[in-house]
Image: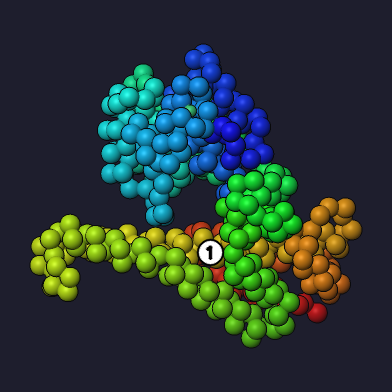
Amino acid sequence: MTVWDDVVGQESAVAALQAAVANPAAMTHAWLVTGPPGSGRSVAARAFAAALQCPQGGCGVCHACTTTMAGTHPDVTLLATEKVVIAIDEVRDLIMTASRSPSGGRWRVIVIEDADRMAERTTNVLLKTIEEPPPHTVWVLCAPSVQDVLPTIRSRCRAVVLRVPPPQAVADLLVRRDGADPAVALSAARAAQSHVGLAKRLARDAGARERRTAVLSIARRIRGVGDAVLAAGELVEVAKAEAVSATQERDAAEKAELLRGLGVADGETLPPRLRSQLKQLEDDQKRRATRHQRDVLDRAMVDLLSLYRDVLVVQLGAEVDLVNAELAETVRSLAADSTPEQTVRRMDSIGVARTRLGGNVAPLLALEAMTIALRPQG
Ligand SMILES: [Zn+2]
């Protein structure tokens, strides 16, 4: 067992990181790990951090390895954000941390999981530190692609590119690590298009599999504009509900914690001078819920896209596996009822909706335009 075990299907990236750990000449102070969502950017970054701290280069069992992997190593700082944008103050804190020598480890490692979520002003604060870091500090930035990061940052980092892992490699991980059933694991890995985290959820949560099937069923249910508008509303509601259920318990705990910290008893009215702190927390929580809802919606659209991709595969008679093998019947009936050109247009409309959602268009508006474009065209 080593720290690299969970970095699946990324042989060349792992080789580059291992070489840097083993050989000082191959080491550098700033890294940019890129790869599509779910390819394991943060898993790879964390494994790299552990390997740098470990006396054996990532044995997976020593104190340095286990604490790094658990997120408790004092010299490894991980910034994972659930907000849409990383605040400039968070980055200033990281820079302070980065300036200190490691307390006992071999390196001080700072990982920023969503480096693409920084405003330009924030990025500029980072630049100088990345350019001339203290001798034992390593920055590891993660982003979906190199283009998501400003060129000024990009040019100062060594790039490590993750690819989409093969579904079988993801399935093997789910079987080995989580004890999933091999057939369920493979179907989940395909349905999740090798997104490791999603595949894991699909493999062990029958409810998640049902929700995914429900999203895909709208492709067949939409017959006219009325159905399309209803389906868009349904998608938004489902995403909202999922965001609420995912965040409300944590929101309440955070609020209780803050009030305790401020010395306010349960049920007591908050003195006016403390209200701004509560407001700040509530604003953060609202942003987090918004981001979660947007992520859920985007996922639903990626699922729909995979269905039309399958339709196109059938229409063109291509010799490749269906992503949605268990929906083969739906795929075939959609393929028979439309032309490849129509399928491509539908896929385009899903892509446009994703872009518009990313650009802060009201979700319902973006989705209605999409579902209307999905309806059968004479
Ligand atoms: Zn170790």
Question: Mark 1 vs ligand 1: CB under 8 Å?
Answer: no
> Quarter of the image holding residue 324?
bottom right
In this rendering, is residue 204 above or below 43?
below
> Quarter of the image holding residue 283?
bottom left
Position in image of residue 191 (x %, y %) = 69, 59
Position in image of residue 242 (x %, y %) = 49, 69
Left of 336 or right of it: where is 51?
left
- Figure quadrant of the N terminus: top right
Left of 357 or right of it: where is 139?
left
Element carrying mark 1: helix
- Residue located beneath label 1 in the image: 296
Task: Tell me, yes or no, if residue 276 can be seen here.
Answer: no
Left of 303 or right of it: where is 260?
left
Disc 1 residue type?
Val
Position in image of residue 354 (x %, y %) = 58, 61
What's the residue at 57%, 49% (across, down)?
37
Task: Tell me, yes or no, if residue 18 can be seen here.
Answer: yes
What's the residue at 57%, 21% (across, down)?
19
What's the residue at 64%, 71% (across, down)?
210
In this rendering, is residue 298 above or below 128?
below
Q: Residue furthest bottom?
A: 226
